[in-house]
């Protein structure tokens, strides 16, 4: 027996010695690179990556004033492992997993771990209350974090364990388009509750679980410092820095600037093919519409990434790409001043009415102001969205470009141009406007309707000059009726009516599908077009009987305020049309095509003469409101040409026109007041004061000559 034991011991020693000798030989025979490669492979398999957050580009006005910017926000962050201690679903899953182990004390060990973690979390919650957050709010935020992560784990568990073919077929095999509710229903149909909990609990390898989630905002530097001290050695709690979109001018140009919010399904498709550009669940994108949405491809930054091996050594790094800035043609100070003035009941009796105003620099077509009221605070829009979207005054809509109105009498200068250029009338020809009711089916003279004893014949010979000055419905309805329908439509179309105006340069889209602002295209036909009009040939017809109503801007005729302002800019430019510009692009400022409409100097002189009389001559429809300012404008080297308008049915008041100085500076503008009864009294005073604001801002008049070289015009 003893000899046998000795033999076994000797044999074991020989085997051990052989193993050591083999190991020594292998270390001599195989190069160090062999082991290094095996170690590197292990490290590669165990490496971890961390993506760096995107930084969104700024939106600037023409002078470099910041309109939108990402600013850092500091939050106390909590790991999902720690927050999930309060999630009863996670607790059940862990206990079920422990129960399947062979060890008798596995369940009790898990219970103790959960209890210890719960006690630690309770201390953290108590500390959070010291930073000004109520306990119930802390618990609710923890619950929200847990719900988001659990839903994500549930969806992934369902995907990994064989979704039903019927569900996949209904969504064309596109997993990402399947609603969570439908996935959960399929999951519940295939597995019992305990089995589902185990499968969901096994999903512990997704990137979102490794992130710290913001729990409470640290609003001051003192809060950040105090949090660092309080939670210095607490595992699962850290300081999280997030980007927060800030709009320094609050409600100014709100509809034009736009806002950001969580990406919708259609947004997620925009960069779906790029791992570092596609949207993560906690990121934001531009929401329709506005610059934030239209220029998403330019503004959006690209995430960077750092990769560490198992030893926490950096093995790879991809630098993040900051979003590019977008510069608008707007002057935010002028915009703010106009908005504040229009909303001030001390100056504007219609201050509570929805309204729009546009100011365009004639030379370059730059939009200096694009006003839509009521507006909203961009910094509060996400929390106020429910109220805003249900407001009957539609503050979210950009009235200046996305609401169409009958133009009323502000279209009459264009009707006169069409009549003179087509030879249907001469400047001196009189169209009689007697003091009587018009025949059935024809517009009546507004002067006769108001006084019941006077027509324009009682004031002057009703020629082109006087018809513009007095805004005679008889003259312009009869003139429009002389025009061939296609000729009338063609002139309106060439001035920019009946189709949308391109506001976003091609560069704003980069390589992604082009976006533009949501706009109304208006209507210059009998029926509303069923498609987006991009060429004159697409327009539905205009019937002969409709022409008389188009002559006074009524009937089925509709336009946007921007279209009217841009048409006035074309007249002020001497009959040269160009698209308005809202966004500066890399291309040269003068690259926007300018089209000669072929209007003779004689016709332009007649139109200018009539629009001058509207403002400056006695009995001009805007003279009463401009009379006291005419001398002041003249002293500031500014001449104003205008046209008032008012509409029936839907009552709106208009003023449209342009202002020039002897130095060659010129601005076109329009004001429309919803519910306003008279363009002369409701809109003209507003336009008058807006012109003064533009003089004081240095865009026209003597101030323009004296303007400092650093101010962009």
Image: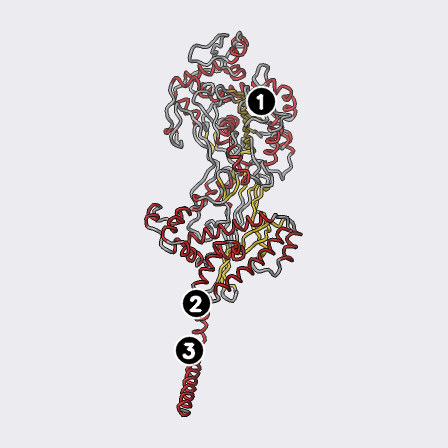
183 left or right, relative to 376: left
| Label 1 crowd (10 A; few <14 / some 14-19 / many >=20) | many
Q: Where is the N terminus found, in terms of image quarters?
A: bottom left
Q: What's the CA distance linking mark 1 and mark 3?
A: 93 Å
Q: Is residue 259 above or below residue 597?
A: below
Q: Nearer the viewer, residue 140 or 207?
A: 140
Mark nearest the camera among 2 and 1 is: 2
Q: Which mark is residue 30?
A: 3
Q: Earlier in the sequence, mark 2 or mark 1?
A: 2
Q: Earlier in the sequence, mark 1 or mark 3?
A: 3
Contact? badges 1 and 3 (CB < 8 Å): no
**Residue lying at 63% horizontally and 23% vertically, measured from the top left:** 634
| Label 3 crowd (10 A; few <14 / some 14-19 / many >=20) | few
Q: Earlier in the sequence, mark 3 or mark 2?
A: 3
Q: Nearer the viewer, residue 597 or 66?
A: 66
Q: What's the CA distance linking mark 3 and mark 2?
A: 41 Å
Q: Is residue 147 above or below residue 488?
A: below
| Label 2 crowd (10 A; few <14 / some 14-19 / many >=20) | few
Give SS at disc 2.
Answer: loop
Q: Which residue is mark 1?
A: 684
Give SS at disc 1.
Answer: helix
Quarter-of-image position of residue 655: top right
Q: Residue 96, position in %: x, y?
A: 44, 60
Residue 616 visible to an observer of this rendering: yes
Q: Which residue is mark 2?
A: 102
Q: Where is the C terminus found, in terms of image quarters?
A: top right
């Amino acid at each position: 027996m003893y000899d046998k034991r000795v033999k076994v011991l000797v044999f074991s020693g020989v085997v051990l010695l052989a193993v050591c000798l083999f190991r020594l030989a292998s270390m001599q025979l195989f190069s160090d690179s062999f082991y290094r490669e095996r170690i590197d492979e292990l490290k590669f398999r165990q490496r971890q990556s961390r993506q760096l957050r995107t930084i969104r580009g700024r939106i600037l006005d023409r002078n470099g004033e910041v309109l939108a910017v990402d600013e850092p926000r500091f939050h106390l962050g909590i790991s999902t492992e720690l927050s999930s201690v309060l999630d009863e679903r996670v607790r059940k899953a862990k206990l079920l997993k422990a129960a399947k182990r062979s060890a008798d004390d596995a369940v009790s060990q898990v219970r103790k771990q959960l209890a210890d973690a719960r006690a630690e979390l309770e201390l953290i919650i108590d500390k959070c209350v010291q930073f000004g957050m109520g306990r119930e709010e802390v618990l609710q935020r923890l619950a929200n974090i847990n719900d988001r992560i659990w839903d994500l784990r549930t969806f992934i568990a369902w995907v990994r364990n064989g979704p039903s073919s019927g569900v996949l077929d209904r969504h064309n095999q596109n997993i990402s388009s399947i609603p969570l509710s439908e996935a959960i229903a399929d999951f519940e149909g295939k597995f019992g509750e305990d089995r589902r909990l185990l499968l969901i609990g096994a999903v512990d390898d997704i990137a979102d679980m490794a992130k710290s989630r913001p729990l409470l905002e640290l609003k001051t530097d003192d809060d950040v410092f105090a949090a660092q001290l309080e939670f210095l050695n607490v595992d699962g709690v850290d300081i999280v820095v997030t980007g927060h979109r800030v709009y320094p001018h609050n409600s100014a140009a709100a509809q034009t600037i736009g806002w950001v919010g969580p990406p919708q399904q259609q947004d997620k498709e925009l960069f779906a093919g790029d791992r570092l550009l596609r949207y993560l669940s906690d990121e934001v994108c531009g929401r329709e519409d506005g610059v934030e949405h239209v220029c998403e491809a330019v503004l959006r930054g690209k995430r960077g990434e750092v990769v560490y091996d198992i030893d926490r050594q950096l093995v790879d790094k991809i630098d993040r790409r900051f979003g590019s800035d977008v510069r608008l043609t707007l002057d935010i100070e002028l915009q703010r001043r106009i908005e504040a003035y229009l909303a001030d009941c001390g100056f504007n009796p219609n201050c509570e009415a929805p309204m729009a105003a546009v100011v365009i620099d004639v030379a370059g077509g730059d939009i200096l102001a694009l006003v839509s009221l009521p507006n909203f605070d961009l910094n509060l829009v996400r929390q106020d969205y429910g109220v805003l979207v249900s407001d009957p005054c539609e503050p979210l809509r950009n009235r200046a470009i996305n609401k169409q109105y009958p133009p009323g009498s502000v279209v009459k200068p264009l009707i006169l141009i069409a009549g003179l250029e087509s030879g249907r009338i001469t400047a001196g020809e009189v169209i009689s406007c007697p003091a009587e009711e018009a025949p059935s089916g024809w517009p009546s003279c507004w002067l006769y309707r108001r006084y019941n004893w006077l027509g324009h014949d009682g004031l002057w010979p009703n020629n082109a000059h006087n018809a513009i000055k007095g805004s005679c419905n008889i003259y312009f309805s009869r003139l429009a009726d002389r025009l061939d329908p296609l000729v009338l439509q063609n002139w309106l179309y060439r001035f920019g009516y009946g189709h949308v105006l391109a506001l976003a340069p091609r560069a704003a889209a980069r390589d992604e599908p082009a976006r533009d602002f949501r706009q109304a295209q208006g209507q210059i036909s009998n029926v509303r077009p069923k498609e987006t009009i991009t060429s004159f040939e697409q327009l539905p017809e205009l019937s002969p009987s409709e022409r008389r109503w188009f002559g006074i801007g009524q009937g089925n005729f509709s336009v946007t305020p921007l279209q009217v302002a841009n048409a006035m800019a074309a007249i002020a430019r001497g009959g040269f049309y160009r698209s308005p510009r809202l966004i500066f692009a890399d291309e040269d400022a003068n690259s926007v095509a300018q089209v000669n409409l072929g209007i003779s100097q004689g016709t332009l002189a007649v139109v200018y003469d009539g629009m001058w009389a509207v403002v400056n001559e006695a009995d001009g429809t805007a003279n009463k409101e401009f009379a006291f300012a005419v001398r002041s404008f003249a002293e500031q080297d500014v001449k104003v040409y205008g046209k008032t308008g008012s509409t029936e049915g839907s009552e709106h008041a208009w003023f449209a026109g342009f202002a020039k100085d002897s130095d060659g500076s010129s601005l076109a503008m329009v004001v429309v007041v919803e519910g306003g009864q008279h363009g002369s009294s409701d809109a003209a005073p507003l336009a008058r004061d807006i012109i003064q604001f533009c003089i004081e801002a240095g865009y026209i008049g003597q101030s323009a000559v004296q303007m400092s070289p650093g101010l962009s015009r």
